[in-house]
Image (tube, rainbow, N blue to C red):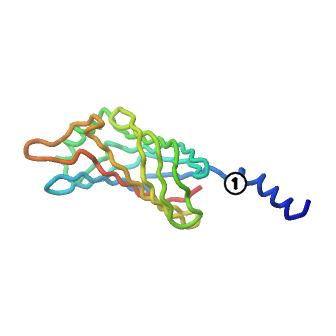
Amino acid sequence: MTIKNILLCLAALAAPLTAADQTLQLTPDNTKIGWTLADPLHTVKGTFKLKSGVIVFDSETGKASGSVVVDVKSGESGSGARDGRMHANVLESDKFPEAVFTPKSVEGKLAPQGASSLKLHGVFRIHGADHDMTMNVQAKLNGAQIDADIAFDIPYVSWGMKDPSNFLLKVGKTVQMNIHTATALK
């Protein structure tokens, strides 16, 4: 056996050991959560605060785990009256103070450097019910630093939350969510 063949054999044996879980540690300091709700007259934008989060994934195997916990009570749009109605009538945040996403799998590969497009599949628990969810992830890796933008929709009315529309005000039935995080990839 030649040296070249020995090195190839060693590399083949070591390859499964190099595929390792990668971890994103999300904190309130490195993560911003925004939401948008359209209505015919104007678009309402707001924020939520992250409580905690960790996403562990292996883009080689497609496995993912962890949890991302959002403080539903922190939701705000800049209007105290609107926010009060949102918390009391739609989110019922006193009864359901958290929303939790539990990742199950990742689709796509994280490039060793530069931009990547991934899909993160999992279960989103909000308003006391679990829903299958796919989040679109645009990630940019620069060394060990990752910047990620995550987008997904919440069809809140079809998920059992109250429609705040009335005869004067008509709002969309889906909230567009976006999350931005910048953290070290471990």
Q: Is residue 98 above or below residue 54?
A: above
Quarter of the figure with the C terminus: bottom right
Of the residues shown, which amino acid type is indicated by label 1? Thr
* Quarter of the rendering containing residue 43: bottom left
Residue extending furthest left?
Answer: 168
On the image, the x and y values in percent for residue 76 come to: 27, 50
| Residue nearest the observer in this picture, 65 or 30 | 65
Label 1 secondary element: helix
On the image, the x and y values in percent for residue 72 come to: 33, 42
**Camera sees residue 30:** no
Residue drawn at x 81%, y 56% is 10
* Quarter of the rendering containing residue 124: top left
**Camera sees residue 41:** yes
Residue drawn at x 53%, y 53% is 24
User: Position of 133 compared to 82: left or right?
Assistant: right
Residue drawn at x 30%, y 32% is 95
Mark 1 surroundings within 10 Å by alpha-carbon count, few (fewer than 14), some (14 through 19), many (20 or more): few
Quarter of the figure with the N terminus: bottom right
User: Position of 152 compared to 161: left or right?
Assistant: right
Residue extending furthest right?
Answer: 1
On the image, the x and y values in percent for residue 120 come to: 47, 49
User: Label 1, on which residue?
Assistant: 18
| Residue nearest the observer in this picture, 84 or 22 | 22
Number of callouts? 1
On the image, the x and y values in percent for residue 151 come to: 38, 54
Residue drawn at x 27%, y 34% is 160
